[in-house]
């Protein structure tokens, strides 16, 4: 490994795993420490990224992953320690410095520009020109070469706004690779993707590693790392607590390292494993031949009528929706991306217009008008995108907690009772184990703690029917377990809970029943009891046979 003539990282000809042993790491952190005032974010962290490998980087929210990514890509500078690139000391004073040496991050919030074409996104910011104008022919040819070389079948002149989330992810990765990136740090790249889409992203990664490109895969999905990574590094509380070849880890050990507790690993034993990208269903798996419903009401059921009954709902993205949930019950929605799960919940919350059907809420007809009206009737949506539709980053944790319940905190002359606000938000912080100063901006918290703040908000708002869309997306193993407990606690208190998730194992762990959503329809197939398994859910959700949608 040598520094290229252009200043970038250049692998020895041949690249790939066969020559890794005689090459220097593409990028390396040596005893890196990072302090923010009194807070120690990273302590003595060492990490190597070898040519042509996929390195899995795991850790709780707040473990230091984001800080390490920022240091490796020049967005932050270490307080102590040394960075190396191609065996030589380097100092990344900016993102541009790191990018010039081929070290680039792709974050969860993709930077694809929806108002221009795929080709323009791939060439940005330097577009081919002819006589002072954009050379559209050359632009298209360059884009086709880039896409086909990465195994991506997308029309380069298509507006990027029309791409699916998976296609956006592929285009952004292709764009950084075409810019000469040699180390690509992927921050939760599969959090919004289904199994088949995850496989497409992983295929792209494996194609690139054959050329000597390396990836740092930051994810909370244990199974993905075990299936995809060549090596694994685990951070906890700013320290590297474990690292080694993938063969040195199994599911139990990795969970134990992440949580710092063998007890958590024991509790995970025997539970459904996470989705294996692209894994086929077992040969003996059978599609249920009819609607199988076994109600398992919680003891906290408080009313003889269902909390929510939806019949024949028609809305944007929903062609037909039937659903029923009782107070004290947790039911699931499962389906591939674009099947209509989110559209159904948004319609119930008043965000998508309802064109037909009937909604009965706590025994009374209900027509969703807008989110404020839904909340007034005790129905609350926790959005799948906490940074877009959830938290208000610049506001404090406390203000984010009470923003949907301010009226209940007003007293004389309409003023907010700050003493009550402080007391009740403190109680919620303790109940949910929200880690961070409640008077600081919520944007300073880790993703898992931000999600807990949103759960606190819906609890303080007094919602009785909870619509939870991907409630554990982008959170670590520990935070996920805590959120599972919060969901169960809400049901025990008599709340009706609908959990929409792309993780079949999550549905099976939390829900008594699950409605499978296919092509905008739900209510045709409802699985429960012994029929509710991850394999059955995946098989029904992706089956193209029309007879699966039985009535």
Image (cartoon, rainbow, N blue to C red):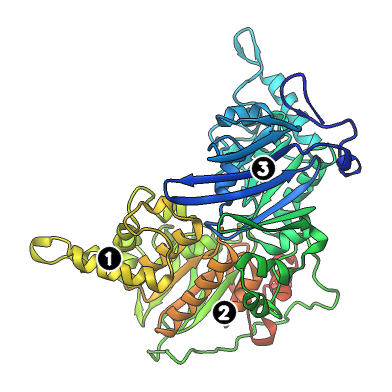
**Residue in view at x 74 percent, y 43 percent:** 49
Q: Residue 30: which disc? A: 3
Q: Nearer the viewer, residue 536 or 76?
A: 76
Residue 361 appears left or right of 41: left
Residue 464 appears left or right of 407: right
Observer-side mark, 3 or 2, equals 3
Q: Nearer the viewer, residue 29 or 421?
A: 29
Q: CA distance from mark 2 to mark 1?
A: 28 Å
Where 200 falls versus 280 (above or below)?
above
Q: CA distance from mark 3 to mark 1?
A: 48 Å
Which comes sooner in the sequence, label 3 or label 1? 3
Q: Which residue is mark 2?
A: 511
Label 2 Cα crowd, 10 Å radius (few <14 / some 14-19 / many 20+): many
Residue 536 appears left or right of 509: right
For the C terminus, give its image quadrant: bottom right
Which comes sooner in the sequence, label 2 or label 1? 1
Label 1 Cα crowd, 10 Å radius (few <14 / some 14-19 / many 20+): some
- Residue 64 image position (x, y, % from top left): 56, 52
Q: Nearer the viewer, residue 551 or 263?
A: 263
């Amino acid at each position: 490994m040598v520094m290229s003539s252009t200043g970038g990282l250049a692998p020895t000809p041949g690249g790939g795993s066969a020559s890794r042993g005689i090459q220097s790491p593409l990028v390396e952190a040596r005893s890196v420490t990072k302090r923010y005032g009194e807070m120690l974010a990273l302590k003595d962290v060492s990490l190597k990224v070898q040519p042509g490998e996929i390195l899995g980087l795991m850790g709780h929210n707040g473990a230091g992953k984001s800080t390490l990514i920022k240091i490796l890509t020049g967005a932050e500078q270490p307080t102590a320690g040394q960075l190396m690139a191609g065996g030589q000391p380097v100092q990344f004073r900016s993102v541009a410095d790191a990018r010039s040496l081929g070290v680039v991050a792709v974050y969860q919030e993709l930077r694809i520009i929806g108002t221009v074409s795929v080709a323009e996104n791939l060439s940005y910011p330097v577009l081919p020109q002819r006589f002072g104008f954009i050379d559209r022919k050359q632009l298209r040819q360059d884009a086709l070469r880039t896409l086909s070389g990465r195994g991506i079948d997308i029309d380069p002149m298509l507006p990027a706004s029309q791409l699916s989330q998976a296609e956006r992810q592929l285009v952004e990765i292709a764009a950084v690779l075409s810019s000469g990136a040699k180390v690509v740090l992927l921050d939760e790249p599969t959090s919004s993707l289904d199994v088949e889409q995850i496989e497409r992203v992983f295929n792209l990664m494996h194609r690139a590693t054959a050329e000597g490109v390396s990836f740092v895969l930051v994810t909370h999905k244990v199974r993905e790392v075990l299936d995809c990574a060549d090596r694994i590094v685990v951070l906890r509380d700013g320290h590297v607590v474990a690292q080694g070849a993938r063969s040195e880890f199994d599911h139990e050990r990795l969970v134990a390292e992440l949580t710092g507790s063998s007890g958590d690993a024991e509790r995970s034993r025997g539970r459904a494993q996470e989705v294996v990208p692209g894994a086929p269903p077992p040969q003996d798996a059978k599609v249920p031949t009819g609607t199988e419903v076994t109600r398992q009401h919680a003891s906290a059921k408080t009313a003889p009528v269902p909390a929510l009954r939806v019949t024949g709902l028609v809305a944007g993205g929903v062609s037909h929706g039937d659903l029923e949930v009782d107070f004290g019950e947790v039911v699931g929605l499962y389906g591939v991306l674009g099947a209509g799960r989110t559209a159904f919940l948004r319609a119930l919350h008043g965000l998508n217009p309802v064109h037909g059907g009937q909604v009965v809420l706590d025994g009374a007809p209900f027509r969703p008008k807008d989110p404020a009206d839904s909340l007034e009737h005790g129905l609350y949506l926790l959005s799948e995108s906490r940074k877009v539709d959830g938290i208000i980053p610049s506001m404090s944790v406390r203000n984010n907690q009470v923003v949907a319940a301010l009226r209940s905190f007003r007293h004389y002359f309409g003023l907010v009772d700050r003493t009550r606000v402080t007391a009740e938000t403190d109680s919620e912080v303790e109940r949910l184990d929200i880690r961070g100063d409640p008077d600081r901006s919520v944007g300073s918290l880790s993703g898992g703690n931000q999600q807990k703040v949103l759960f606190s908000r819906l609890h303080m708002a007094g919602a009785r029917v909870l619509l939870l869309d991907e409630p554990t997306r982008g959170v670590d193993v520990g935070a996920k377990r805590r959120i599972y407990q919060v969901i169960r606690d809400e049901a025990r208190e008599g709340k009706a809970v609908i959990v929409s998730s792309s993780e079949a194992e999550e549905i099976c762990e939390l829900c008594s029943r699950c409605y499978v959503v296919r092509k905008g329809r739900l209510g045709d197939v409802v699985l429960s009891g012994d029929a509710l398994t991850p394999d059955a859910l995946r098989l029904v959700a992706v089956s193209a046979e029309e007879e699966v949608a039985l009535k």
